[in-house]
Image (cartoon, rainbow, N blue to C red):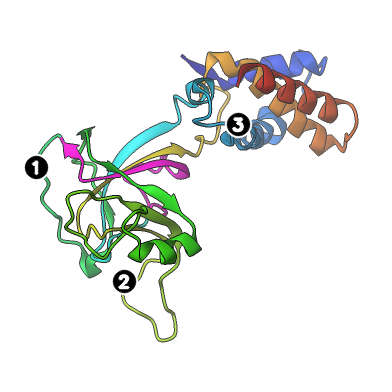
């Protein structure tokens, strides 16, 4: 069950001993603080994601799986506007190629052969997981048949896929038409093919007290502490509310993640 922003605001005002006053307003104080707070909270637990199941449970409202069609160069740009503007990619969890989909895959005709999100497709099962490589590994593994990303025999039955994350291949002098500024490359190549990406989306910013937060109820206390921390920064408090809130968050995370 999602958390109402108004519930967080009430708990924050109570912690600040400001119930019934207009000292902390929604638009000027609490909404900016809660938006910064939830981003800071994701930063804290992001390193734990996948290490323990509890981290993924905290993220369950934020974890999405979507299908893209790769470019003619076997690349995917997840920074382009998504079908839903509420699903901007925060952190990639996994990349899968050659998946089984809900319907047979037919490549869409995309200008310039760029990658594109395919909201008409749904990941069902199977496929090959792609390992993440560094720049050096990307070059070194190309000719090594025992490593991920080996590409000398792209049609081998024992494919071991890899991806290189977020590189700008666009050349602005002279400009190359339709080049994308921030792409993930997959090898062995899968040009104009379905690619399933599981990711953590950026939390939806709060605009009104009646909005829901993209977190389960179990994270209420953590969100209150994160919001208090941001309020403290605005007040110029670097010792009491700020330090206590941060200490409380770290202790809670340590005990549950």
Give yes or no for residue 251 being in the magenta stretch.
no
Query: Where residue 16 sits in the image (x, y, percent)?
Result: 81, 18
* Above or below: residue 77 compared with residue 212: below
Q: Which mark is on residue 178?
A: 2
Query: Where residue 254 sits in the image (x, y, percent)?
Result: 68, 22
Residue at the limit of the structure toward the right, as seen here: 239
**Element class at badge 2:** loop
The answer to which quarter of the image holds residue 71 is bottom left
Crowdedness near tag 2: few (<14), some (14–19) or many (≥20) residues, C-alpha within 10 Å: few
- Report the quarter where the C terminus lies: top right
According to the image, label 1 marks what residue? 104
Dot 2 and dot 3 residues touching (CB under 8 Å)? no
Query: Where residue 153 sits in the image (x, y, percent)?
Result: 22, 62
Q: Could one spot residue 20 in this view of the protein?
A: no
Q: CA distance from mark 1 to mark 2?
A: 27 Å
Q: Nearer the viewer, residue 214 or 212?
A: 214
Residue drawn at x 72%, y 24% as measured from the top left:
249
| Circle nearer the viewer, 2 or 3 | 3
Crowdedness near tag 1: few (<14), some (14–19) or many (≥20) residues, C-alpha within 10 Å: few
| Circle nearer the viewer, 1 or 2 | 1
**Element class at badge 3:** helix
Task: State which tag comes first along the sequence, 2 or 3.
Answer: 3
* Above or below: residue 214 compared with residue 194: above
According to the image, label 3 marks what residue? 45
Range covered by the magenta-colored residues: 78-101
Dot 1 and dot 2 residues touching (CB under 8 Å)? no
Task: State which tag comes first along the sequence, 3 or 1.
Answer: 3
* Above or below: residue 252 compared with residue 81: above
Residue drawn at x 75%, y 18% as measured from the top left:
13
Q: CA distance from mark 2 to mark 3?
A: 36 Å
């Amino acid at each position: 069950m999602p958390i109402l922003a108004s519930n967080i605001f009430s708990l924050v005002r109570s912690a600040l001993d400001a119930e019934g006053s207009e000292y902390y307003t929604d638009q000027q104080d609490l909404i900016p603080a809660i938006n910064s707070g939830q981003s800071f909270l994701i930063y804290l637990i992001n390193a734990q994601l996948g290490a323990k199941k509890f981290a993924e449970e905290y993220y369950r409202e934020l974890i999405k799986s979507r299908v893209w069609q790769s470019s003619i160069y076997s690349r995917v740009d997840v920074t382009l506007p998504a079908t839903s503007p509420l699903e901007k990619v925060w952190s990639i969890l996994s990349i899968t190629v050659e998946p089984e989909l809900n319907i047979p895959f037919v490549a869409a005709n995309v200008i310039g052969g760029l990658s594109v999100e395919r909201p008409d497709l749904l990941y069902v099962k199977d496929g090959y997981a792609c390992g993440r490589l560094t720049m050096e590994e990307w070059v070194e593994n190309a000719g090594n048949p025992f490593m991920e990303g080996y590409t000398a025999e792209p049609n081998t039955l024992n494919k071991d896929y890899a991806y290189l994350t977020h590189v700008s291949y666009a050349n602005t002098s002279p400009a190359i038409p339709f080049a994308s500024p921030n792409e993930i490359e997959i090898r062995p190549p899968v040009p104009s093919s379905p690619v399933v990406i599981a990711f953590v989306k950026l939390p939806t910013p709060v605009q009104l007290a009646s909005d829901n937060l993209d977190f389960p109820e179990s994270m209420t206390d953590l969100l209150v502490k994160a919001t208090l921390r941001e309020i403290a920064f605005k007040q110029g408090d670097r010792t009491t509310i700020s330090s206590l809130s941060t200490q409380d968050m770290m202790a809670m995370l340590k005990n549950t993640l």
